[in-house]
Image (tube, rainbow, N blue to C red):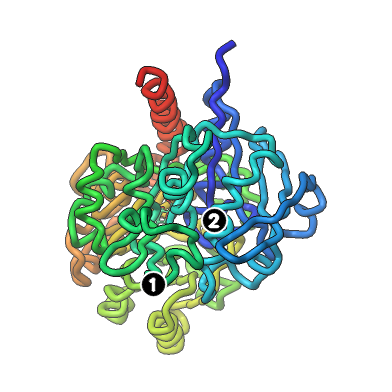
Amino acid sequence: MAKKISLLFATPEAVPFGATGGLGIVLGSLPKAILQLSKVFEVGVILPLYGAVDESVRRDMEFLGCKEIHLAWRRQHCGVFKIVRDGVNYYFIDNEYYFKRDGLYGFGDDAERFAFFCKAVLETFDITGFYPSIIHANDWQTALIPIYLKRKYYDERRCIQTVFTIHNVEYQGKFGMEMLHGVFELDEGAKGAVEFDGCINLMKGAIECCDKLTTVSPNYARELNYAYFASGLENIIRSNAHKMTGIINGIDLEAYNPLRDKAIHVRYGRQSLQKKAENKNILQKALDLPQRNEIPLIAIISRLVAHKGMELIEHVGEELLQKDIQLVVLGKGDKRFEDYFHWLDFQYPHKVSALMMYDDVLARRIYAAADMLLMPSKSEPCGLSQMIGLRYGAVPIIMKVGGLSDTIRDVDYDENGNGFVFEHFNAHDMLYATQRAIEHYKDREKWNAFIKGIMGAQYGWRQSARKYIAMYKKMKDDRVNA
Ligand code: GLC
């Protein structure tokens, strides 16, 4: 039998062991999908052991060993734990000083925390016994892995091939040049790889040093060639275009299945849409909104930050609320937007419910209750909510950008349409698309037939995981033939 390809995903987050958003959801499902589709791989995932990991999960972990990791002048404890889920080996790097905190990132020493993590990933193969032939790193927190492999380690680890995925170019990991030696433990020779605009830019370094570069939709891969989307990295991305592939994310169709979802009040499917209406009724009651079935309930489930398009809503929110609609907003983010939605809720208590938090159970209940899901993103690498929305029969209203544009087609212009689309980042274009959705909704018989259709066509992992598999295999073949 041919030797297996051992593939190690390095990530700062993975559901259910710590997540703040889409990256965690993707890393919670892609490794399993790869294993299910191909017998050629051995799959591992390595991530920090965060304080937030549940006691019940910790109890099932096996302690594999520990060692001291050096990071410049520091000597840090590094414990390694393991758990196996769906055949995937999850490895956890333990250091309570770095990772037992309230939250995953946003600390003054994030550079040091993730430099430690990346070194630990590369220095604990003897403890895990998992010697990867490919490491697939994700976002800036793991960007030092391809950098270290090209510019720091001069031993057998140099044979490890790397994939680097950009989940969002807005978060690049930029730090002061003075950290080069003392925090990142890199020498002058590595400076060229990581330096950008007078700073250390870890994402830039990974783009330069990785063997394959991917991002999470074909359209975002194209967009990243332009300054409007690439946050300064357009030239670096263009000069590495030969390494770049855009592969759309999928969702775990089992984890997001309204027929089985334990979080929602009444489970339903395409053949029992009246039960979706019951979910709506229960949510309206819980949120103190009038319990009316015939009113369109529009949901926003998003981080409340500028690039998710919240300013468009700020512009025309009140105009939108002149219509007979209900608006439910779930998410956290910039104070400016949180304040705005609180204010809207205060002004229109019978129409708006603003829930400034992130809560997975509540999110699912809202998907199950909502008729429409508004995603007016200015940029959106992939977006998962629109896929979850389709699965739960909440029709996406989207800005034609990034992965949204790869997954949603306008029902007014395409017979296979599955949502409503506006093409310019403009508040009134968004309003118009929403109004079209509201008009369609009035013909409930047609609307229900539409929902039945969109709930049937799904974005699971199958196709996309196959693309990753083909890429990994080609990397191996190219190495053998080189
Ligand atoms: C980031 C992106 C989002 C994408 C997710 C998973 O959160 O903003 O568009 O779906 O990563 O790749």
Q: Nearer the viewer, mark 2 or mark 1?
A: 1
Q: Nearer the viewer, residue 290 or 244?
A: 244
Q: Is residue 369 above or below residue 452?
A: below
On residue 322, which mark appears?
A: none
Q: Picture coordinates of residue 362 (x, y %)?
A: 58, 64
Is residue 444 in view from this perspective?
no
Q: Picture coordinates of residue 251 (x, y %)?
A: 49, 44
Q: Residue at x 41, y 72 (%)?
A: 178
- Tell whether circle 2 marks a residue whose Cβ is less than 8 angstroms from ligand 1: no
Q: Picture coordinates of residue 214 (x, y %)?
A: 35, 43
Work out how far the residue at label 2 is from the one at label 1, CA to CA, in angstroms.
21 Å
Residue found at the far right of this picture: 59
Q: Is residue 178 left or right of residue 231?
A: right
Judging from the image, what secondary structure is the residue with disc 2 in? loop
Q: Disc 1 marks which residue?
A: 176
Q: Amino acid type of disc 2?
A: Pro
Q: Residue at x 50, y 47 (%)?
A: 26
Q: Quadrant of the N terminus?
A: top right
